[in-house]
Amino acid sequence: MRTTLDRIRHTIGFEVIALLLITFVVSHLVGLDPTRMGAMGLGFSIIATGWNYAYNLMFDKAMLKRFGTVVKTTKIRIIHAMIFELCLLVITLPIMAWWLNMSLVDALILDLGMVVFFLFYAYGYNLAYDKLFPIHQSEVTETSSDAQQCTNC
């Protein structure tokens, strides 16, 4: 499993790149004010940062417990990204409608567009991150035996 510092690096990198993309690319594509989109993106980034850390930790612990490894197949990566984004959709939809002064339906359409964008982004980012910062088998073995000894983790 990854160390706390590695998870923090992963999360910060994910959110910084996402915030830049939302502020400049998405706002331009949908014709909304970059300042409002940037502010909303920053707020969502804070929410997503906490959720990203907790979700990835829970997901990896569940994988380790169920499969004995945290190595993710393509199928697992897709499931991982979809569950993450579905949870964020539930949190962000009412906030987006209020902040951008739009109906829930319009916010849902915009949010679903962002979910599709982030599905591809999360998959690509996590794949690239795992290639740049691989988990070594010795770390997985040590963590696996630590997890077996830890009953309150």
Image: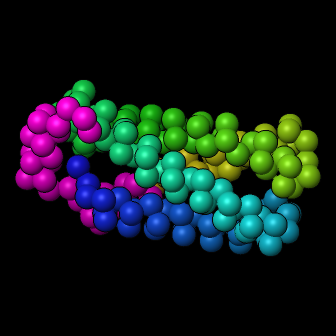
The C terminus appears in which quarter of the rendering? top left
Q: How is the image coloured?
A: rainbow
Q: Which residue: 75% across, 42% down?
A: 93
Membership of 122 in magenta stretch: no
Quadrant in which residue 130 is drawn: bottom left
Q: What residue span does the magenta drawing correspond to?
A: 125-153
Q: Position of residue 115 (x, y in %)?
A: 64, 45
Question: Does residue 111 appear in this view?
Answer: yes
Q: Which residue: 31% across, 63% down?
A: 6
Q: Which residue: 20% across, 55% down?
A: 135
Q: Which residue: 86% across, 55% down?
A: 100
Q: Is residue 59 above or below residue 11?
A: above
Q: Considering depth in this image, is 127 or 57 the residue closer to the camera?
A: 57
Q: Position of residue 62 (x, y in %)?
A: 31, 33
Magenta stretch secondary structure, dominant:
helix
Left or right, 15 with reference to 135: right
Q: Considering depth in this image, is 2 or 79 the residue closer to the camera?
A: 2
Q: Is residue 35 above or below residue 135?
A: below
Q: Position of residue 22 (x, y in %)?
A: 68, 64
Left or right, 128 with reference to 44: left
Left or right, 26 with reference to 144: right
Count of marks, rendered view: 0
